[in-house]
Amino acid sequence: MKNSLVIGLCLVSILSFAQEKIVEKDTVYTLKEVSVNSDVIVGSKFKAKNRAGSTSFISPADLKIFNYSDISRVLGKIPGITVQEEDGFGLRPNIGMRGTNPNRSEKITLMEDGILIAPAPYAAPGAYYFPTTNRMQAFEIIKGGSQIQYGPYTTSGTINMVSTQIPNKFTGNFVSSYGSFNTKRMYINVGDNFKNFAYLVEYNNRNSDGFKKIDYSDKKTGFQGNDYVAKFRINSDFDAKIYQSLTFKLQYSEDNDNETYLGLTDADFKADPYRRYLGSNEDYIDTEHFQLMATHYIKPLKNLTFTTKAYRNTFARNWYKLDGVNLGTSTVSINSILEDPIKYNAEFNAINGSANTIANALRVKANNRNYEAQGIQSVGNYKLEKNAFTHEIEFGIRYHEDYEDRYQWVDGYAVNNKAMNRTNTGVPGTDSNRITSANAIASHILYNLSYDKFTFSPGVRYENIDLKSLDYGKSDIERTGKNIVVEKNNVGVWIPGIGILYDLNKMYNVFASVHKGFSPPGAKAVEDAENSVNTEVGFRMNKNAFSGELIYYYNDFSNLQGSDNMSGGGSGTGDLFNAGNAIVNGIELTATYDFLYNNTNQFRLPITLSYTYTDTELKSTFVSPIWGNVVPGDEIPYIPTNQLSLMADFEFHKFQFAVGYRFVDAFRTRAGQGTIPANYKVDSYSVFDTSAKYLLSNNVTFMVNVMNLFDAENAVSRVPAGLRPAHPFGINAGIAAHF
């Protein structure tokens, strides 16, 4: 760790003095990257680099370099973020920050346009729904003391996805591409802005045959999905005494993915990483998501604004997938079979189709669930400049309620002559049959006081959460409540934080923050909330051709929290477990240097480096359903120690060419220390991507993207069950038109 810190400091020092000339030009901020509206929480790179806490802004220009549709690749260059891939396309990413478990992104606050977007963020935070990446205009990532406004998860960080905004004038965009594995994408939007009315409508289609092949089957392993969005705004005259606007947003998406929880054994992955066993032939996930949001903005005074959002999200999904094998005695989970295919040789032969089975041997579970989240929130902003002081106060309150309804069943299948045949149709409600709900009131206040070169940002958040679980049991499919088990839990917590920023000379600033980390408890009284004290200190600079940031953080957990999810290799109960004391600390470094900064021929060659070092240590002894037998000194699973990203972007007149590289260190899938056992290890991996664009006219661009340029056969995960591959070599070509 000391070596990493020394290297980072040396790099920043060398590059910071590479230019002698001092220019009062802002080399980070450009007007084209500003988003000033009620859907953003940062708004620009300039603002991100002038906050008293770790903040990143991925702008529209950044997103257009590679035109990624995979959020894993979009976030790969942001230090402090861990993304555990699963399907190779980024359909359901697993995102963690600063040492938190990335499983289903359940330990971070996910938002779209400033409102919570996980299906049930309090009751069941596992994000089986994730917004379509290529309909987003920008991404805002907030970590450290900057994020206490955006709960309930304040331990690690917040991601706000800014959807395509209503344009300022009549505008249309069309993007279409075709590539490897019959992958097709099309996106179109049209919008206009009048004096008192504005609108935007958009459509997004994506589909692929997939890059895996199921044994003895012609079934495709890809996906297909559609996304529809409409926004309408009415507003008063801009010169009205009190300006107001009311914006309505409607979004609907449908997806059907032939995706599975079943991976491969180590030996089979080595022979063919893109193979799928016959036992996954019937696996698919079918989803529908609907969002309705109304946003009211009012500016009653010159320095005072209020933004109120009412929202309702519904999400329905059925992930129909192989769950286990029963050859006549007991059911063995697919995770256990893949972990030890020798011990469970007969079950493994049933999965891979090499042996016929009895009826109902393969248990395919319909993980059928419905979610609902709705609420209303209002945020006020007041700004006053007086003498040498600038006062900015943000205050807000939110009422939120959500629930998850599990109503699941299991079908039976047999393998005969290398084909799966259904031998029994289960009854809905005879597997998991419960409702978990939450009601929450949250409020916050943040005060930014600027004087001379100092900015002080104290703030506090309050969360009051009521959780309830109603388990009707497997025999009460009508939900009469005759054998109902009721669990309740409540927590009220204050979450304080403070940040300090010192601007040295408009090109350098230093900052520090400390805040309370918090994650809500589960519905059972024994499932405690996660609590920590988190600190960070950072240095930024922006001088001529160079900009960079170096941050050290230290998170001290009094109670770390984990969850027993099948997606993380557990039994799938969703129950939380208490992991006790833990320490997570690390280094986050990002640096950009334009090697052609002084060139007068319109050449640009910025190269960006991003590095993350993460050190974790569990301090308690306990037994976990997915982490194993834990003793003090063990490392937290799923967290790579080192991550590195490099990107070079060459631009000249009508041509643009970019190369991206990403390295992810090996990580363990069970808690432990020292050398990682082979059966609990995902090896380190590297991947190169490239992108080229040519401007055919002022409004039409031809583009080619290549993923995994050298076709590296990388394993990216060992959960939910067995090794899983990254996307292989793939090339996509398309056209983008703007009018």
Image: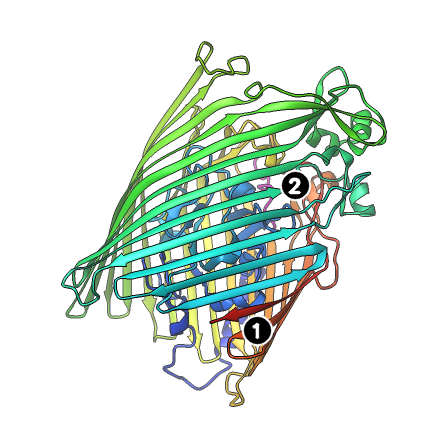
Q: Which circle marks residue 701 in the picture?
A: 1
Within 10 Å of the Cα at label 1, are there few (<14), some (14-19), or many (20+) other Cα atoms?
Answer: some
| Camera-side residue of 590 and 223 | 223
Q: Which residue is at 53% across, 57% downward?
A: 75
In percent of width and height, residue 608 lies at 55, 69
| Camera-side residue of 726 and 70 | 70
Q: Amino acid at mark 2?
A: Glu
| Camera-side residue of 315 and 588 | 315
In percent of width and height, residue 51 lies at 35, 62
Picture quadrant where residue 650 is located: bottom right
Secondary element under disc 1, as helix, strand or loop, is strand
Q: Which residue is at 35% across, 27% downward?
A: 490
- Main secondary structure of the magenta stretch: loop
In percent of width and height, residue 603 lies at 55, 84
Within 10 Å of the Cα at label 2, are there few (<14), some (14-19), or many (20+) other Cα atoms?
Answer: many
Q: Which circle marks residue 433 in the picture?
A: none
Q: Amino acid at mark 1?
A: Thr
- The residue that disc 2 covers is 259
Q: Which residues are magenta?
A: 632-641
Residue 315 part of the magenta-drawn span = no
In percent of width and height, residue 153 lies at 41, 43
Residue 444 lies left or right of residue 103; in this view the side is left
Asked if 315 appears above or below 307 in the picture, the reply is above
